[in-house]
Image (spheres, grey):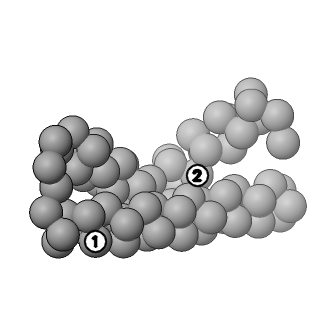
Amino acid sequence: MDIASSDALKDELLKTNPTFRELIHQHQNYEQRLSELSGLTYPSDDEQIEESTLKKKKLMVKDAIYAMMHDYELSH
């Protein structure tokens, strides 16, 4: 899948698939929070654990997004 078809596929799924939109929204929220946490000079233990957990969740969501894109591409 090249970048142009990837973008078109992503746009199509954003328009037509509410589950895909929710995954994209979750990914963006995780990214925003991770950005906030990385800006901390001295994160607490809880913040370090949160950062680690969010990185794992973000990766799982990203995998789900790409799996949906792949399945959609194969079915169309």
The disc label shown at residue 49, or none:
1
Q: Position of residue 55 (x, y in %)?
A: 43, 62
Q: From what the image shows, is residue 14 above or below residue 6? A: below
For mark 1, does the 10 Å Cα neighbourhood hold few (<14), some (14 to 19), or many (20 or more) residues? few
- Left or right: 33 in relation to 70: left
Quadrant assignment, res 73: bottom right
Mark 2, residue position: 13
Residues 71 and 59: in front is 59
Residues 53 and 48: in front is 48
The total of numbered circles placed on residues is 2
Q: Amino acid at mark 2?
A: Leu
Q: Residue at x 16, y 44 (%)?
A: 40
Q: Residue at x 28, y 71 (%)?
A: 49
Helix, strand or loop at label 2? It is: helix
- Left or right: 50 in relation to 72: left
Q: Position of residue 30 (x, y in %)?
A: 33, 56
Q: Residue at x 41, y 55 (%)?
A: 27
Outermost residue toward the front in this view: 42
Q: From what the image shows, is residue 10 above or below residue 65? A: above
Image quarter of the C terminus: bottom right
Of pointers 1 and 2, the one earlier in the residue sequence: 2
Q: From what the image shows, is residue 28 above or below residue 6? A: below
Q: Position of residue 11 (x, y in %)?
A: 57, 40
**Does residue 53 appear anywhere in the picture?**
yes
Residues 46 and 57: in front is 46
Mark in front: 1 vs 2: 1
Helix, strand or loop at label 1? It is: helix
Residues 6 and 49: in front is 49
**Does residue 19 appear anywhere in the picture?**
no
Distance, label 1 to label 2, CA atoms, is: 33 Å
The disc label shown at residue 9, or none:
none
